[in-house]
Each structure stands twice: as C-alpha cells, then as structure tokens.
Image (cartoon, rainbow, N blue to C red):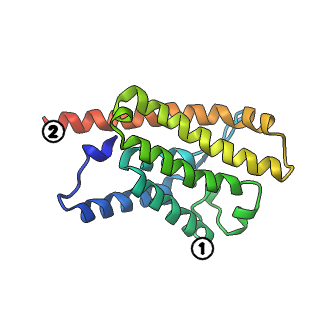
Amino acid sequence: MLFRTLKFHPAYITDFTIKLVIQLILLSTLAPIVIKGDGMTPITLQTLIILFGSIAFGWRIGFLATLLYIAMGFAGLPVFADYTSGIAKLYGPYGGYFFGFLVASLVTGYLTEIDMFAKQMTAILLWFLGHLIILVCGLFWTTQMGRIGWWEELQFLFPAAAIKSVFGALIIQLIYKIIQRFKK
C-alpha cells in the first residue's frame, strides 16, 4: 500500500535498497521484543514487523527482508523473539512459523501490489490473512511434533494475532495519511 506513495529516491534500485535496509532495521530491533503480562498471551512483534514490510513495501522487499532476517537469526544474531537465535529454532516447536513468515510475506506482499487490495478496507484483510497463514503453518508444524493440539494452540495464539492485525492496519493507515498530507 505504501510502496506506491512512499519513495525515498527516484532510482528504483536505490529506493529498493533504502526500503530493504529500513525493513531489516525494524526486524532486527523490534521483532525480538515480546510483550508479556499477567494472565495474557505473550505478544511477539515478529509477525507484526514481517507483515508490515510486505504490506508497506510489497512482496520483493518483504520476502527478501524476511529471508535475510531468518538467515541473521540462524547465523546467531539475537533477532528472534525474546532475543534468541540459532538454527535449532528451525527444528524446534516453532520451526513452522518461520516457513509461515516466508509464505505470508510473499502472499500479502503480492496482494498489496494489486489495485483491489490497495484500498483501506481490503488492506486490513491482508493483515488477518498474513497472520492466518503464519498460524496455519506454525500450528501444522507444532501439532506434527506432538506438542499440543492445534485447537488449543490456536485459542492461545489467536487473540495476539488479532490485536497485531488491527494495530498493523492502523499503523499503515496512519503512515499513509501522513504521507498524503505532506504531499499536498
């Protein structure tokens, strides 16, 4: 949605690189944050930032940034939730979510580049779709490992995904409105 209106440089490759660096900075600094509270599901910012990059900048930047983010974490940089890292994360109970990150960044980024999804109401649906893709991939992996039933896990994770979807949609809309105001 923002990829049409937010240009940092007239040259495509320079604009692309700036947006990619911005997304990687967001991923490496904000994605590790986990919001914890008494009696509430911990909310990680990983999916919020991954989907932001794809919905704001399109599938090319979103997917590449997500792939590089995962590579940074596997290489040992503490960029995953709660400042963790390591390739063992791929083989653990959350490995399916990493695959979901990649699929969701492709799908939501691709759809955001279609005119029909560039509108405010359909853009909001992209956030829910992205979180749904991530949850389905993650839940499939988790249940295959015999950790917990998919329904129990979904009930645990869905409230945080819904909150992040609404919050993400509001952030994109706010940035879009600010850009439009400055363009006038």
Report crowding for label 1: few under 14, some 14 to 19, many 20 or more residues within 10 A (C-alpha). few
Of the residues under marks 2 and 1, which one precedes in the sequence?
A: 1
**Type of amino acid at the residue the image marks with label 1:** Ala
Is 135 situated above or below 170? below
The image shows residue 59 at horizontal and vertical percentages of 42, 52
Q: Which residue is mark 1?
A: 75
Report crowding for label 2: few under 14, some 14 to 19, many 20 or more residues within 10 A (C-alpha). few
The numbered dot on residue 13 is: none
Task: Report how far apart the C-alphas of labels 2 and 1 lie in the structure.
Answer: 41 Å
Residue 36 occupies quadrant: top right
Q: Quadrant of the N terminus?
A: top left
Is 85 situated above or below 110? below
The image shows residue 82 at horizontal and vertical percentages of 64, 55
Question: In the image, what residue occupies the spot 67% across and 48% down?
Answer: 137
Do the numbered discs 2 and 1 sit on residues whose CB atoms are within 8 Å?
no
Q: Quadrant of the C terminus?
A: top left
Question: Which residue of the protein is positioned furthest toward the bottom in this rendering?
Answer: 75
Question: In the image, what residue occupies the spot 38% across and 49% down?
Answer: 58
Question: In the image, what residue occupies the spot 60% across and 36% down?
Answer: 161
**Type of amino acid at the residue the image marks with label 2:** Lys
The image shows residue 18 at horizontal and vertical percentages of 31, 61
Viewer-proximal residue, 42 or 100?
Answer: 100
The numbered dot on residue 183 is: 2
Query: Is residue 52 visible in this depiction of the protein?
Result: no
Viewer-proximal residue, 130 or 69?
Answer: 130
Question: Which residue of the protein is positioned furthest toward the top in this rendering?
Answer: 121
**Mark 2 falls on what kind of element?**
helix
Query: Is residue 147 visible in this depiction of the protein?
Result: yes
Q: Say whether residue 161 is left or right of residue 125.
A: right
Viewer-proximal residue, 171 or 132?
Answer: 132
